[in-house]
Amino acid sequence: MSLYGWLILILSVGGTTLSLVYCLVWVLQNHGKENRLHATPDLDPRDADR
């Protein structure tokens, strides 16, 4: 493979790997959202059938 082929390969794989690592770090960090409620505790899931 030529020099330019290796360069494109390294940049492509490196960019994709960095993007994956960035996304994983973003998702796995909490960002201070431990107090956010996704649902209120007074909801009864059986009420969804009505």
Image (spheres, rainbow, N blue to C red):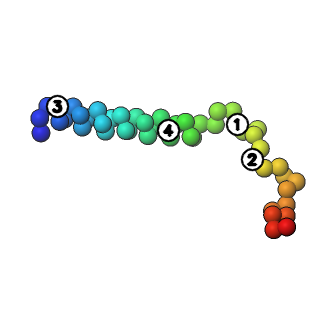
> Circle 1 is placed at which residue position?
33
Q: Which residue is painted at 37% across and 38% down in the image?
A: 16
Taking the spot 85% from the left edge, 60% from the top edge, the residue there is 44
The residues bearing labels 1 and 3 have C-alpha atoms spaced at a distance of 45 Å
Label 1 secondary element: loop
Whole-number angstrom distance, CA of label 3 to CA of label 4: 28 Å
Q: Quadrant of residue 37?
A: top right
Q: Which mark is residue 23?
A: 4
Query: If the image is split into quadrants, where does the C terminus sit?
Result: bottom right
Query: Distance of mark 2 from mark 3, alpha carbons?
Result: 50 Å
Please tell me whether mark 2 sits on a helix, a strand or a loop: loop
On screen, 49 above or below 35?
below
Residue found at x 43% / y 36%: 19
Distance from disc 2 to disc 4, alpha carbons, whole Å, reads 22 Å
Q: Amino acid at mark 1?
A: Lys
- Image quarter where the N terminus lies is top left
Residue 38, numbered circle: 2
Q: Are marks 2 and 4 in contact (CB under 8 Å)?
A: no
Counting residues from the start of the chain, the first of labels 2 and 4 encountered is 4
Res 46 seen here:
no
Task: Specify whether 41 is left or right of 1.
Answer: right
| Amino acid at the residue labelled 3 | Tyr
32 shown above or below 39: above
Q: Provide residue 46's location: percent of width, then percent of height.
A: 83, 66
In what element is the residue under mark 3?
helix
**Closer to us: mark 3 or mark 4?**
3
Q: Amino acid at mark 4?
A: Cys
The residue at the point 81 percent across, 63 percent down is: 48
